[in-house]
Amino acid sequence: MLSHLKRKKIIHLKNGEDNIREIVHKTLDQEDWKKLLISNRKKNPTNYYNVPCAFDIETSSFYQDGEKKACMYIWQFGICGYCFTGRTWWDFMEFIEAVREVFDLSLDQRLVVYVHNLSYEFQFIRKWFTWKQVFAIDMRKPAYGVTDFGLEFRCSYILTGKSLEKCGDDLRIIKCKKLHTLDYSLPRHSGTELTTKEMNYCINDIMVVMCMIYEKMLQDGNICRILVTKTGYVRKLLRDKCLYSGQKSHKKIKTRQFTNYRRLMGVLTLDGYREYKLCKEAFMGGFTHSNPRRTNKLIKASEDEEAPGSEDFTSAYPYDMIASDQFPMSKGEFVRPRNKEEFEHNLKYYACIFEVELHDLKATFFNDFYIPFSKCRAISGAVTSNGRLVSAHELTITVTELDWDIICRTYTFNHKKTRIGYFVRYRRGYLPTPIVECVLSLYKDKTELKDVEGMEEYYQLRKELLNSCFGCIVTDILRPENTYSEDWDEPKTFETEAQYRQWANNEIEKYNNKKNRFLFYPWGVYITALNRHNLWMGILEFNDDYIYSDTDSIKAVNISKHQRYIDNYNRHCKVLLEEAMEHHGLDLAACHPLTVKGEEKWLGVWDFEGYYEAFKTLGAKRYSFKKYNKKKKKMEYSITVSGLNKRVTVPYLLKTYGKKGFFDCFTDDLFVPAEHTGKLCHTYIDEECSGKLVDLDGIEGEFYEKTYIHLEPEEYSLSITPTFLDLLTRMQSREEPDFI
């Protein structure tokens, strides 16, 4: 198989060729593919060809009579190093029919074909096939689709979470990098003559996917063992560790560990929709925001301040999962605190999630604001800062005791008018030992294998699994099901709230009774809450020196002034880890493995990431900086803006404004032309289109699509809302903001 991929045989099927089937048969029949058939299970097996296959298309998007159009002008299909290309959908279907015959495909005998970003190709091909089954993670985002004759398309982007370029860069066995020689803006149709460079680009894309899948087959054992999604791997790893004593076989091992874990899951159930809704409302992601007093200002070293720098938590979420004993570890109990003393007693000794109605809310800490406006209900008189609440006449919000602690530290409100609604409490405890063991093992591998020659692939795998642990735990229980029959089905709707509640309660009951369930949704709520609390203790410490934060990092000036706090925090982390390891009966050494250079890497501690020559932020997910790259030995300029591709935008800004003007242009009125954003607007069109298109050479050709996607570069305007801009102006001009 490796030799097949290395030799790479290209077969160009000419437009409208009469003998496509004959060519395909002649090419592929020389191989004994039947030897590569394997079964996915012992009972009622489905046979799969254990070969790497890939499919890709190239398209042109254009306007005709003011309407958005698009057409495919070349398709590429790879089968274990054989690379077929064609120019029309009719040739493609003729080719597919030949493949069906060669491999004798059926629902019981399948060929898996990977597509990098299947959601795009699926929109073009979906009306050309009859689909037996389609699984989608979201509307128009299929993870896989099975045709009625056993051709199974899978999404390699959902599998890897990487761009095709990154997949090529990470290849270890066969070096095959993505090329960058195709100008997508030029009009092409099926009759357009492609240059050798353009054709090589097309072929190379499917070669990257085939080589990547080949390495995945070696890594997992065979194609049947490759899971559909990236998070599926960590889910399987955790499930096997919790329920099957970590064995590869799913035969239930009657050990005490397994029995105890099943008993635990029998206790950790949700009390219907009421408790789920409370948890859902309380869930918030990582905190990302900027100090309004330092927003829209260029910050660099001066006589009064040290250069801005960055402090990051080391594996923040894994640390919280391992070190904290504040997780909900009992069945939730709804209570009604009768007075302040009972309320505070619950907060002190239990993990609590509760609704609270606040009146006359005002911030007392003005270097950032904690409460997200999007999480507030029944709110009036709100003053916001880039989506965060500065003040309000009244509001209702659902929080944990950890959120409540930060709110009380950073806001005042009318205590007499405060009302507590639904209130659920849990006994606190550590996460189960099997989960902790799994996370520790991944962290140890990630740390020890980094930069180790020959272990790049395994390091990348373990790192990705570690990063996916949190996502696995916080997966929503009541995710809407996205189904496809002859078309995308409308999401399930309910005429009344009562109907929805009944459906939700039924789904939650199924969740509670799942025999192979090994996770508890409230755990996910607390992982992020613990992380936000740790981060905000740092924000409060840095105070006026604080610039910007994002989930597990703080950008600030005068970091050395806060070194005592950092050292004390790090010592406390180590104490908590020691206590946790003693509780679990595990070796503390797993919490501070050694890097390849022999350096200890403690979980959870603040880690200094270096200084910036200059730093500027315009709000959440909007910042730019200049920093010296020690590895490359040069000064680098960078931006992070949601919606912009820095690899495209940064060179444009430097060319247009120069190094001196790089930060001057980074303002609330920054405009980036469409061709320099790296951002494409996708328009899904579910109607047929046909006509004639004049290509880049001035040659007219016909096109036809049953359904398609129109792609168009999208310009970007970085704007700050007038309200936020007014707040910044006021806060930066006054010592005490008396406007709230």
Image (spheres, rainbow, N blue to C red):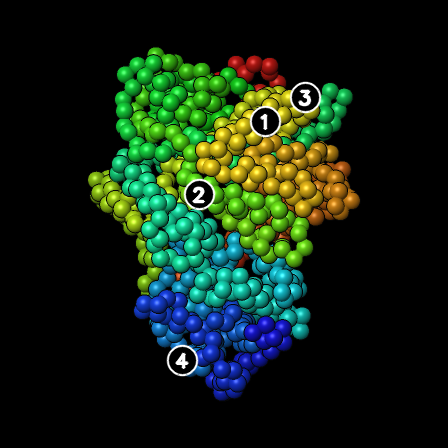
Q: Nearer the viewer, residue 684 or 556?
A: 556
Vertical comparison of 518 with 684: above or below? above
Q: Nearer the viewer, residue 700 or 645?
A: 645
Tag nearer the camera, 3 or 1: 1
Visible residue check, residue 366: yes
Vertical comparison of 273 with 47: above or below? above
Mark 1: few/some/many CA within 10 Å (<14, 14-19, 20+): few
Residue at position x 40%, y 47% from top?
Answer: 242
Residue matched to label 3 = 561
Mark-to-mark CA distance, 3 and 1: 18 Å
Tag nearer the camera, 2 or 4: 2
Query: Which of disc 2 and disc 3 is earlier in sequence?
Result: 2
Query: Which of disc 4 and disc 2 is earlier in sequence?
Result: 4
Vertical comparison of 377 with 167: above or below? above
Residue matched to label 1 = 571
Residue at position x 46%, y 53% from top?
Answer: 233
User: Hey, what amino acid is under mark 2?
Assistant: Ile
Query: Which of disc 1 and disc 2 is earlier in sequence?
Result: 2
Q: Where is residue 250 in the image (x, y as percent from the top left)?
A: 37, 57
Disc number at residue 435?
Answer: 2
